[in-house]
Image (cartoon, helix red, strand yellow):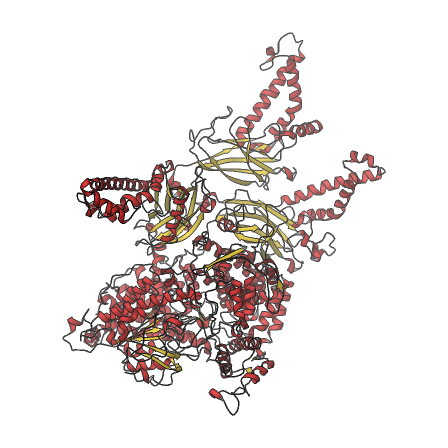
Amino acid sequence: MKYLQVILVLLISQFSWAGEAITPAVLPAKHGVFLKNYCHKCHNAEKQNGKIRLDDVDFTLNTIQKADLWQKVLNSLNSGEMPPAEEKQPIALEKADFLDGLSTTLVLARKRLGDSGGNIVMRRLNRREYGNTIRDLLGVEINTKELPADGGNGNFDTVGSSLFMSSDQFEQYLALGKQAIEEHFARYGNASQQRLAKKIHIEAEEKNDRIRKALADRTDARNRYMKWTYAVDAAANKSENGDLAAKIRSEKPGNAIHIYFEWARIKGAPSPKEFGFVDAVDADEQGRRNWVHYVPYHKAYVNHPANKTGTFLTVEDVFVNPYLAFRIPGDWPGGDYVVRVKIAATSNTPASRHFMEFGSQHHSGVRAVISSHQVTGTMDNPQVLEIPLKFSPSGDRGFFFQEKGTYESDNSARRIFEEGIKKNGVGPEFALWVDWVEIETRTSNPEHKGGQSEALAKSWKFRREVELHANAMVSGTYNGYFKGGYTVAKAYLDSDRTKPPSAFGKGISDEIEAKFRVRAFEQHGPSFERYLKDPLTKTGAFLTIFNVHTEEVIDLPPDHPSGWVKTKHPVEKLPPGKYILRFRIGAVEGTPRERHFVQIGSRAKEVEFLLLNTFQISGTTKSPQVIEMPITLTAEGPRSFVLRERRDIKGDHAWYTAEQTKTGVGPPPALWVDWVEWEGPVTNQFQQSVAKFQHIEVEARSMEVGRIHERSRQMKQKYDHWKSSGGDANRLKEFGFNDKDHAEFHKIVWEQNNRWFQQYMEWPKSKSGLYLDNTVNETSEYAINLPADAVPGDYVMRVRIGKLPNMPTERAFLSFVQASPIDKDDRTFLANRQIMADIENPEIIELPFRVVPNGPRKFILMEKRPLKKGDISLPGATRLIKDSKQRDPVLWIDWIEWEGPMMPNLLQNVGKQILFAKGSEKKEDEHAAEILEKFASKAFRGKPVNKEFVSKLVTIFTQRRKAGDSFEASLKDPLSVILVSPYFLYLIEPSSENRGRKLTSVELASRLSYFLWSAPPDDALLALARSGEIQNQEVLLREVDRMIANPKATEFVHGFVHQWLGMDRLDFFQFDTKLFRDFDESTKAAARKEVYETFAQLMRSNESITRLLKSDEIYVNGLLASYYGIEGVSGDEFRKVKLPEGSPRGGLLGMAAILAMGSNGERTSPVERGAWILRKLLHDPPPPAPANVPQLSRLENKILTTRERLLAHQEQPQCASCHRKIDPIGFGLENFDAAGKWRTEETYEKRGVGKKTWQIDASATFHQGPKFSSYFEMRDIIASRGDDFARGFAESLVEYALGRPCGFTDESLLTEITTQAKSHNYAISQFIRSLVTSQQFQKK
Amino acid sequence: MNRRNFLKGSSSLIALPVLESMGYRAFASVKPISPPKRMVFLGFGWGITNETWFPDKTKTGKDYTLSAGLAPLARHKEKFTVVQGVSNKFSNEAHWGSTFWLTGANRYSQPGQSFHNSISADQVAAGFLGKDTRYASLQLGCEKASDSGHGPGSMSWDMRGKPLAGPENPVVAFHKLFSTDNTPISERQAMLSQKRSILDAVMGEAKDIQKGLNKTDNDKLNEYFESIRDIEIRLGKDEQWLSVPKAKSPIPEPKPGLAGKEEIKVMYDLIVAALQTDTTRVITYRQPVGTLLQSIDIKYGSHDISHYSPGPRMEASQKRDTVQSELLAGLLDKLKTTKEPNGTSLLDNSSIVYGSNIRSIHFLDNCPTLIAGGGANIKLGQHLVLPKDTPLCNVWLTLLNGMGMKLERHGDSTGVARDLLA
């Protein structure tokens, strides 16, 4: 109901906007006094100096002329021109206040006069959108950098009025379109050629020959130098040269080599040319300087044993290996490749050096870093890093690896090298070692899947039906040891015992043993018998506890056949590598849920069990599940793996015996295995080879509930008995209670829950699926656990679900939640989905989610409601709900499936080729027409295609055909024409002069997808548009949720956040890595990504925008965590990290990227930071920098603290009018240095003046606002301004989404959006939802 | 008359390149032609160091002393004039050094629009000087122009006030100017005719769309129409130029990845090459400042040093001025040594404008302005201090008329700057 209310409110409130009168900007009347005092004297009716009259000036700035006049006033005051020096001057504060008031009014007036009146201008696709649209349409990436940059005027790049078109640009579109078509044909057109996968493998040590040779050359040069200098010395030491030599030496006393430079003056001294040098300078360089400077490092490299099998990445010395370069061969086509590198980090180097950069190298040698990666492999256990690579034939074919931060510039590389020498006399320690590099075609397209990985290496796959082995073993033990022994022993014991036991059969030595064997059979025999009689052992094997069949052993290969069944070995010994164990398993009905866990361990010796993993079993014997687990075989490590029920080995015997005493048999088995399988070695490259899939039939829930109900019933019964037997506390134990409270507790449990459990089982479909109710019982949610080793990546959860009739529709929302592995109450919303389908005809919904290293593996499905139990405040969510409409289930789930990791593939909807086969009866040009029309229809995003247009295209096709081009080639031109058609290049929403037409469904779909994806609608969205369902606001909102969850929404995050927060400033200057060693390009890239990732996570998990102001969690990767000094995070994936107490991070203010933007690359700029906060966080933007304000020069040659320097701003009223607001906020961030690291003191050195160090003082007072004594206090004050922040965010969002400046006509829209969002705790997703459902978004 | 015949017949009508370096000798027998006029506008975004770039205001005319910032230009002192006192009165954007520099427009002059611009001086010139060259004008730029203080859009704005874009790095510029097209002429003729079919097809689409549009959208669509019409005009030109191969480049293809000082140097070489081969006669160049600083080892941001105060930032600002002046001196050297067929130099026939809408810091008055070369027929070797607040557009008007146009106004001009006239 809530959403309907939202919509209703929007509808009502927005009918008023069209008629709303816009009030113009007015300069407050109080400023008249200033004019009167300082201006009227000259600018009045009589004098009108400069033809300007200010005595009758209008304070209402409602025309451009009036605004221009006031601008003049502002300009002349700012420049200090007015009032003239000889006239009366205003006091500083007075002037500052006037300037403040006037500049603010002018900003308002400009905004108001420039207001487009809510008109959304037809717009061209911007550069990002164009690239994405081509990508989605053709499945190729093109370089759109050639197109001119969009935007400007401080607007978003979606603002239509700023998106121009020129003839040059048109030509560029034509060329790019054709390029894209050609690339498409190259990739998807000529199938036979394309399918050939390419691969090269480079052993890194191959590079070392060159390096060894270089050392030999250097050694040779050294020897020649030594010979030469020796000869020069010899000549100098000749007595005839004695005086001269002494004279030369005295020219540069203490410089032993000076004499060699002067060799020519010494008679008989040989020329360096004779020794193979160009001249003395060359000899000195080669024979001495290089030797001293580089050769120790060079030698250390060549002599390092690890360089026999690989190579280290080094620093600076190009004769060694400052970067490892390799090339893609010239005949390889463009497409998706994967670069794989086996790499390790050394243990004697700091973790901060364990990052590798990958990049491309132009043939001129210019290198550009593409990505950086954390190296976690060690020299003992190197890792294989995989880097996806999009390779375009027009791009560079050269690529390289280097250690992060070793090359920012020649100078910095040299500096690092020299620091290394200073430290150890050799050079920087080797940090990264590369074993080999591989480049291989990657199959990103379903059609291209498979084919090559199998060919890489021999691998095996082996499946075993476990019942054969297990039954043979169990029945062998039973019939042989137990029953056989029993028969012999019994016969012996029943005899007169004159004959020894051996006379009755084998295996029993004496009477004692005979008695024991009889007892053993009586005790254990029935358990074995029960096992063998169970029909399920005909198709699989149970795992029992303590006895019978306690474990299933998987040997790789089965190298000790049990003796009962001979298994054939696929191979004698498997090579080391990664293998996969797979087994099909189910839980036995009626056994307790806590027994539904299976353990996998490895076994090196007899009975050893080294636990590898534990899985919860949700499958049943009727519907088993397949569990898959990767294992690693090392050269000498264990090859046996054991499956068993999770148990307490020590207690098992007691449990077994107790149960056996009571019932005659041991505890019934809880797990049943259908088969086991192993496969491998698997090559690591294709993630899908280890992708997992699990289908879960959820009706077991009913059984569980039944069991809980039954146990509870028993406890209640006992309670009643106890009560009726007088309630004697001493007798509690007899009834199975610990004490009185325990007994009372069970009574309460029964009273509170069992109605629901009872009822649950009575729901008609509880035996074929599961219901989710709105109580706090177990029946309110369902958890899915992914295996702990689930490979990180993108997954999808599929749920077949329906809603119950006659229940409130506002409850028909399914929430998808993840639970923290550490704190079970720490839950995060992933998605909310409205369920439309009926229980009789359920729908299958897909919920994408992401698994990150060490991240949550537990996912929960429940009806939409507050996440944490403590947060539950909805009336429906307590135990004592009376209203069955609020309490009883609305949602019913048939089954659940999860799958992943999915290939990271944005192009899933493409690959539908442009070309398709010709129907036999068709003429060629008809066929061409068909292809063109179909492509045009897709390219035009659902707009109908004009027949005449198609026929013109066919004419172009025919022209080419007649000119002799092939059918395919002749299509290229007409196809690229489609890509310059205005229907493709523009988002067109035709409308007559009357504004306010409702968008058609297809237009709405485009507006939506360009908003959230910067890309055209996909098939699903277009289908909803075509059927008109998109006009249903509930369907629309469901699409919004789907689109936000989709990886394509990254485009929105990057496009919007980058512009909203003005992040281009991050690239405006180079950080001096001498001062900020850690803040190199990689760190900067990670810092930038932190902003995006944080926003994306908050958006996708329905979190509040205010968490950008302050938060106790951050989203970082290993690199950034180490930069922030946060322990325990490693890897390249960004993930949520809880901050330690007192950390200054959390929220934008603590992000390195934001702080770095507020600097000049060397020192902090409190002005930039303060202005940014006013603009972006507090929604109180200072006016743009005024022109022509005189600058202070009084402070030259003084060393001032940052604060002292800035306080000078307050001296002049022109400056003070803005800086009094800006600067104090900047002071509050002074604890962060220019690169965003925390500091407590600062040092400033001014050449020739001196040096000063001071303690950071982060206290200040907001202009006309509160005081703060520290960064933390300031952050709290800013965090308390969530309403302002939300308002500013909403304005930006509206501008970005509607493609026009957010103007005054948007007041009511903004109010609605922020009000709605506020009622949802300012969830980012709610801003988007409210905007999308607004009239403005849905109307032209 | 079919297109092929037209082409055969029309080739003698083409105004051919006239320079010594190419073509001229081969066609010299046709008729002696006096060298064409050229205009180049070089913008340096963030402005200069106020204290050390301008010559002393009290010493004007011929006998002035070059300032420190202009010192590297000493050898060309007779070939340029420094103008003080000019500005664009509507300019209020303290970070936009190029957007309104050549237009003098009022950003806020259109109600309901937050941005408006009008035609720039170079485009006025292109309409006049660009008829006979392969490209009527060329817009050179740099990446991240806003970091270099240029402001949004372009330096060049067409007659509808829309920005014109062009190559943003030397390699792209080189290919645009000199990349040879090896396609046979017949093939290229077919391509031209095909392009007409393409334009015809999309024009039909645009007309179809136009029917249902309101006024603002129609204005937007007009940009599309106009760009197609421009291409049609260009196609006509291409047709004329079909049998004329692109000029052979006098310089090798630039290395990719150049940034800052080297980038500007190479762009200057390309400017000379483009003029020398008569590929175009009007060029604008939004020079990089941010990367220039990095390339001369100044670690400060470009905006940051434009707010210099005495000390290291002012020194950095001065160093930037010097390097920029050195680069300009190099350009003038090359223009001077490139000879025209009649014995004059390229510099004698060109007007090279060097300046910005921003003076320094946030000052938009007294826009730094330096005009070199004899193309516009102005007084050279001068230091002129015009009355305060003389419209910068008066200077543009003077130059344009000096080129041979007969204009009454440009932007907010109030008349020609008589003091400039030779």
Query: What percent of the width, then of the height, locates residue A639?
Result: 48, 31
Q: Quick check: A1185 left or right of A979?
A: right
Name which quarter of the figure residue A502 lies in.
top right
Q: Quick check: B258 left or right of A351?
A: left
Compared with residue A628, is residue B240 higher up or lower down, i.e. above or below?
below
Query: What percent of the width, then of the height, locates residue A274?
Result: 18, 43
> Which of the image's four quarters has the N terminus of chain A?
bottom right
Seen from the viewer's position, the closer of residues A455 and A358 is: A358
Name which quarter of the figure residue A1270 lies in.
bottom right
Q: Which residue lies furthest to the right in this view?
A: A726
Q: Which residue lies furthest to the bottom in this view?
A: A46
Whether residue A980 can be seen here = yes
Query: What percent of the width, then of the height, locates residue B401?
Result: 30, 82
Seen from the viewer's position, the closer of residues A543 and B224 is: B224
Compared with residue A36, is residue A495 higher up or lower down, i.e. above or below?
above
Whether residue B211 can be seen here = no
Name which quarter of the figure residue A126 lies in.
bottom left
Compared with residue B383, is residue A343 higher up or lower down, i.e. above or below?
above
User: Which residue appears at 71% of the width and 53% of the height?
Assistant: A878
Query: What percent of the width, then of the height, locates residue A895?
Result: 58, 48
